[in-house]
């Protein structure tokens, strides 16, 4: 499922027309020998839509449909759907004259496809922030329980940071995670742009440090905070640890002048891109935990799940690395093991973010 996140935080999905019926579908195809499922899906996205992007190795889910075979018979087929973070669309691709491509909002994309399970997957991919923040909730509560308490609420609002400063800073930090994750994934594709993406990660990490300092400063100077002070500092620290580990990965690559990367490393960066996307959706929902508790629970569950999948990729990658390098290329093995370690720690820090958010949901939803 090729997707892109728009400037307003909403998501768009690219659909294509099928060759025979011309109905709107996702790019898809059979598994390709020698490629994993998500790699096969990414290859099909190129052949059918000319799309290049970062595929997450863990699917969003699956759906079933009746596939028409060459002899005209129908075959019940299960399709696993992998999120593919859009990077670019080529000017030419194998099936460009056989299909149409179009970007849809999630709502329109869900309405355009036929399969109910696929409709649900698209609709549930990303939800826009909704509801009202803590101070506004308090105002509604006061109006419902009597005008006498309005003065208390006004005093409460006066003490809050202007314009929900904590939430604004959380969301700004989440954007640095998204930018750094995208740069990290592009870095691991190799080529002549490694130094450029390492510099971008360094710059975003610097931005994130400034944001973290602002949050800690606001914690000290604000009498009433939207959450417990320790919860605020733990959440922003977990987010900052994630980008610190991304920066550490980039520094190791620069230090050891690594130019080529194994597929399991690239797969882990795909998981990091997905983790950052989920975090960027979850953080704005903290403005109204009571309203968004169920969605936050679903998002943090996926974060925890993809962390487990990243561990499997990490272990398999290290095993393959040891077998291919062994004693003959011991120093190269040590360097690449360090890079694997950094990548694993990035995903672990995103799991820490998920745990912090889950704790807030338990306390406040």
Image: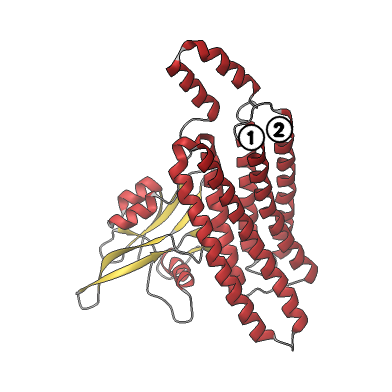
Q: What is the residue that sits farthest to the bottom in this orientation?
A: 328
Question: Looking at the image, which residue is at 61% across and 76% down?
Answer: 317
Disc ID at residue 166: 1
Q: Which residue is mark 2?
A: 218
Quadrant in which the N terminus is drawn: bottom left
Q: Position of residue 342 (x, y in %)?
A: 69, 64
The x, y position of residue 289, in whole percent, is 50, 37
Question: Which comes before the other along the chain, label 1 or label 2?
Answer: 1
Mark 1: few/some/many CA within 10 Å (<14, 14-19, 20+): many
Distance from the alpha carbon under mark 1 to that under mark 2: 8 Å
Residue 351 percent across, percent down from the top left: 58, 56
In the figure, 331 relative to 102: above or below?
below
* Tag 1 near tag 2, CB within 8 Å: yes
Residue sitting nearer the eye, 346 or 362: 362
- Most foreground residue, 282 or 94: 282
Question: Closest to the observer: 190 or 357?
Answer: 357
């Amino acid at each position: 499922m090729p997707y892109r996140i728009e400037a307003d935080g909403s998501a768009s999905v690219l659909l294509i027309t099928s060759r025979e019926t011309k109905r709107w579908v996702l790019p898809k195809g059979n598994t390709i020998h020698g490629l994993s499922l998500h790699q096969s899906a990414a290859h099909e996205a190129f052949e059918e839509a000319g799309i290049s992007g970062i595929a997450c190795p863990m699917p969003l889910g699956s759906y079933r449909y009746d596939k028409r075979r060459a002899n005209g018979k129908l075959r019940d087929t299960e399709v696993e759907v992998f999120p593919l973070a859009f990077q670019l669309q080529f000017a030419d691709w194998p099936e460009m004259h056989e299909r149409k491509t179009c970007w849809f909002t999630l709502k329109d994309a869900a309405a355009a496809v036929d399969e109910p399970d696929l409709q649900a997957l698209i609709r549930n991919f990303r939800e826009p922030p909704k509801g009202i923040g803590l101070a506004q909730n308090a105002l509604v509560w006061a109006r419902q329980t009597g005008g006498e308490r309005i003065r208390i609420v006004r005093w409460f609002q006066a003490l809050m940071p202007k314009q929900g400063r904590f939430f604004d800073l959380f969301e700004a930090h989440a954007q640095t995670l998204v930018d750094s994750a995208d740069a990290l994934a592009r870095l691991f594709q190799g080529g002549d742009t490694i130094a450029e993406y390492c510099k971008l990660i360094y710059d975003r990490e610097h931005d994130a440090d400034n944001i973290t300092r602002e949050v800690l400063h606001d914690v000290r100077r604000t009498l009433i905070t939207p959450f417990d002070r320790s919860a605020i500092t733990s959440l922003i620290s977990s987010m900052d640890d994630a980008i610190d580990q991304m920066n550490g990965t980039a520094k190791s690559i620069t230090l050891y002048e690594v130019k080529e990367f194994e597929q399991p490393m690239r797969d882990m960066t795909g998981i990091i891109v997905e983790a950052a996307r989920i975090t960027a959706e979850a953080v704005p929902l903290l403005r109204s935990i009571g309203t968004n508790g169920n969605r936050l629970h679903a998002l943090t569950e996926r974060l925890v799940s993809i962390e487990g999948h990243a561990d499997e990729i990490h272990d398999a990658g290290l095993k393959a690395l040891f077998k291919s390098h062994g004693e003959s290329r011991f120093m190269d093995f040590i360097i690449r093991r360090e890079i694997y370690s950094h990548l694993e720690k990035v995903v672990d820090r995103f799991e820490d973010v998920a745990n912090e958010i889950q704790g807030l949901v338990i306390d406040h939803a």
